[in-house]
Image (cartoon, rainbow, N blue to C red):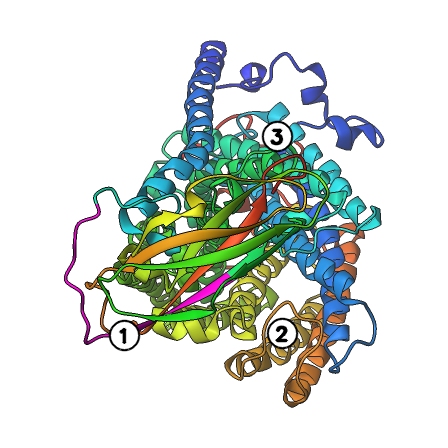
Amino acid sequence: MNTAAAPTLDDHDHGHHAGPSPGLMRWLVTTNHKDIGTLYLLFSLTMFFIGGAFALVIRAELFQPGLQIVNPHFFNQMTTLHALVMVFGAVMPAFVGLANWLLPMMIGAPDMALPRMNNWSFWIMPFAFTLLLSTLFTSGGGPAGGWTLYPPLVLQTGDAFPFVILAVHMLGVSSIMGAINVIATILNLRAPGMTLMKMPLFVWTWLITAFLLIAVMPVLAGAVTMLLTDKYFGTSFFNAGGGGDPVLFQHVFWFFGHPEVYIMILPAFGVISQIIPTFARKPLFGYASMVYATSSIAFLSFIVWAHHMFTVGMPLAGQLFFMYATMLIAVPTGVKVFNWVSTMWRGAMTFETPMLFAIAFVILFTIGGFSGLMLAIAPADFQYQDTYFVVAHFHYVLVPGSVFSLMAAAYYWLPKWTGHMYNEQMGKIHFWLSVVGVNILFFPQHFLGLAGMPRRIPDYALQFTEFNMISTVGAFLFGFSQLLFLYNVIQTIRGGVKATDQVWEGAHGLEWTLPSPPPYHTFTTAPVVK
Amino acid sequence: MEIREAVSAGAANRRLVKRLLLITVAMFGFGFAMVPIYDVLCQITGLNGKTGGRQVAAVLPMAVDEARTVTVEFVANLNVGAPWEFAPQVSHMQVHPGQYYQTHYLARNLTGHALVGQAIPSVAPGLAAQHFQKIECFCFNRQVFQPEERREMPVVFRIDPNLPSDVHTITLSYTFFRLDDAGG
């Protein structure tokens, strides 16, 4: 191959090889995977702060019993929008941003397989979220029935309702397009010699995640469409008066919802599997078992959904099936955790910021996994259902889980993306404030839940006061320490010590063979992987 | 040669995208297919207390278990915006499994115009639902009310003696829904 024949993908796009278009139009019309990756990451960071602000409203109200700051209806809007923004606006787009930046560079492809669709799938998102957040200003306020959108409660949403449904549809379309793009890129654009079992684990976990996305996002679209027709077109999917059943919605929703939680954690597993070997200076322990474990988790995620609804009334056989199937997930997850620990075992470890976040991920995600196992026990679940124990559980897997992996990824690849080293000292301070803050924030919520404090309630009984105060202090500590991260990222983009191509001594993989920052177009001639 | 590679890569992408879109459309359909699947499963298993319009097909005589007494509680609910007065005649009854019993629900149209309503039954605990047989029930049909009409509506039921022995109380709950204009 020579460079004259390099236009392999987008040969009719004349601006493509001349570099980025000037000015702001660059970002609007770009089909470059690096630009779109940057857009996704910055969008997700913005949403992370908006969703975080909502969370601080919740925690501020819960600092003391009684109603101090907001009224209950607004509180409910905050819990609902916090979840929707964090799930669909912060965590998912952040992983899509990482995929855009890294997949082509990791498999030796010049760009994503479908660059124009890539542009479209990003630019749907700001519109969807403008629509969703604007509902806060409609009469009746934003959605307040919880992010799970259970009928009949959600049907009482005011004028916001159709906007929320449309926003969810748009987010679904965006995710599905992103997922199709990822699958097409990984299956069709690998460099010669890059066999499936040679792919970095981040690529593997994203391939599996993308299949989960195209399998379940349409189911969510179906569920919210049914809600829409129930409210406006007289259908009775979930309306008992017309022969429907509201419990059916829970089945359809969680058929989407459980794979969805793995959509938010599998790419995190991939990130951690890239970072730990780098700083342990050893290859990943048990690569093949990692691939099989990820696939098993993805498969199992389709047959455990009813553990979210043990209390709706289910035959004993159903409860036992969903209980055992759920517990089975601990096996492949355990394989992963032990592999990470074995990778570190007798490694020449150093503790730069990405590694600190990665190690905290392994420990704290495992705590979240254990509380998940407790919730999986059907007879015990009747006690935990809808309490703060559930809140503590899923925040442990999502915040020091998914979000920490995103922080680790940002510190790890930021020197590659920007060409500058971030401020290591500030990174470490950010890490320690975050890890202390997140535990002060979420650990007491286990105790609150076991003592019976219900979730999604703006007021509580007096005996819960101390733990709620501690939790709120942790929330503000964690929330405000993220400003350090923001500052560090901005400073790194603007300048700093020049990063080397390999950046980290122990880093291996195609992306580290490129210059830092990589040129606008990379691997226009495919590398050969031996 | 590289150009040819590019073309074939484009074709491969198109083929793959078509397949993936097919999966997407199929899964969208699957979401809706869950509706009839769920209904059939509930009918077979009596899941979720759904006894719906299930009328006992053949009313076979059953041995009456005089030794056992089960409390049946009656509950009446109105859906939001259903302008009726709706209440059971008695709040509970002591019954023997196998024996027929009759009770009434009372309903009164609170408006000055005709209304159509439908009562939806639910039995708790849910797993006892399949042992609760309604022989005759106002919930089998739509109920038309004249302006201000007050009416007694009968329920004839019996408990299957196969009811698990740990069930001592069964709650029969009706929710009344308005079916005309402002319905449900």
How many residues crowd around disc 3 within 10 Å: few (fewer than 14), some, or many (20 or more)? Answer: many
Report crowding for label 2: few under 14, some 14 to 19, many 20 or more residues within 10 A (C-alpha): many
Q: Secondary structure at mark 1?
A: loop
Q: Which secondary structure class fits the magenta region best? A: loop
Is the residue marked by circle 1 packed among few (<14), some (14-19), or many (20+) residues within 10 Å? Answer: some
> Which of the numbered marks, if any, corresponds to residue A438?
2
Under circle 3, the secondary element is helix
Residue drawn where x is 57% and y is 81% of the image: A448
Residue type pointed to by label 3: Asn
Q: Chain of mark 2?
A: A
Q: Chain of mark 1?
A: B
Choose the circle earlier in sequence order: 3 or 2: 3
In the image, the segment drawn in magenta is: B59-75
From the image, state whether disc 3 or disc 1 is nearer to you. Answer: 1
Asked if A203 appears above or below A261 in the picture, the reply is: above
- Could you say where residue A420 lies in the image, as x and y percent from the top left? 71, 53
